[in-house]
Image (cartoon, helix red, strand yellow):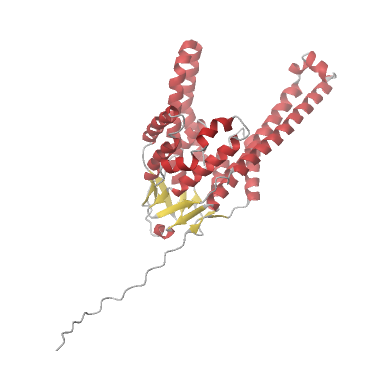
Amino acid sequence: MNDMSWTPPGPPQLPPQPVPPPMPVAFSGSRNEFFRLVARGAGLELVTLGFYRFWLTTDIRRHLWSNTLIDGDGPEYTGRGKELMIGFLVALAILMPIYLGYFLIGIEAEHLKAFASLPLVAFFYLFGQFAIYRARRYRLTRTVWRGVRFWMSGSGWIYALKASLWGLLVVITLGLALPWREAALERYKMRHSYYGDLQGSFEGRGWDFFKRGWWLWPLMPFALVTVFGPFAYAAFKAIEWRWWLSGIRFGEVRLESTMRRSALIGLYWKVIGWAMLLGTLFSAYLALCIFLAASINGSSIADFFRTEAFARSIPLMVLPGIGYLALALAMNVVMRVYLMRDLWVRVLSSTIVHNIEAAANVTARGELANALGEGFADGLDVAGF
């Protein structure tokens, strides 16, 4: 007689769930709309003596954020121009006594001024790194996607100390330590960045950054003093963007960039071309101003300068100033169109999001940060997106 064993059937095996494909990031904004936005903003900056820039910065961010589509939805930027202005004024009230004290020391004794230069530079570098961290914290807490806010913890002063020590190492190594500095600082920032209760992290390594761009280090001193400077800088920024984006994580959500080294070269050369064109137009405008001022004075151009009548010419004082303001505003428009909007679009077009479904069930957390960091960044000229 044969022995037979029987095993009761278990629960039915579910078929493996298909892995969602990577999600490309898209941009839906109109270039003409952005141009009108920054052109109008430049005119309002002129009328308001520069104070409109806080509202213009806010409008630019809202345009870029809202037209960046991730899985079909764009984030919302909730910052306000008034917040940036108040942050700048508070930061200015803190920075002005420092500037004034240094100026008075310089008047009191030249040798003390020379002695104070190095500590002052070190202080402002430290303060600038603090401002960079706090400004990023402000922008992150004003960014909402699918009803959930990004936010950031951590200490701006600890970050500033880390950045300063790494900066010193970069100087000592003649720039070779830069990739490891960027990796260490980004790890600190991302470790304290959150999307709701989803914690961020950074997986990029300094060695990977160095491998991609090591050939730029020996070329950079030569490139900076030649026509190859824009090529080298654009290639470096493309490598940096690709490395940085590919290292970002929020829980199981990860980004990947496929940006080529040559992706940004055209943008920088377009800016240089516009700068040369606008500079040529400004030179022609100055020549016309001199001709008009000499005609009003009733003398030839040679006599106008030989008799030093140009020093007493009111039109020659006013008209070049107007032309210079127009040149500055035009360059601002060019840089915002090419190095903000177009650069943003090229970066996004190379970005892919993996495991976006991991951000589907996120609990809202975090509190709003004030705009003081943005104010310091603006006052120290280290502001960014």
Left or right of 256? Residue 11 is: left
Q: Residue at x 76, y 19 (%)?
A: 313
| Residue 289 position in % (x across, y down) | 77, 26
Along the line of sight, which residue is nearer the eye, 329 or 21?
Answer: 21
In the picture, the quarter occupied by the N terminus is bottom left
Along the line of sight, which residue is nearer the eye, 20 or 54?
Answer: 20
The answer to whether any part of residue 192 appears in the image is no
Left or right of 154? Residue 342 is: right
Q: Residue at x 78, y 16 (%)?
A: 305
Q: Residue at x 84, y 23 (%)?
A: 295
Give the residue furthest to the bottom: 1
Figure quadrant of residue 8: bottom left
Figure quadrant of residue 301: top right
Along the line of sight, which residue is nearer the eye, 56 or 239?
Answer: 239
Q: Residue at x 37, y 69 (%)?
A: 16
**Residue 267 against residue 328 in the figure, above or below:** below
Along the line of sight, which residue is nearer the eye, 311 or 257?
Answer: 257
| Residue 311 position in % (x across, y down) | 74, 17
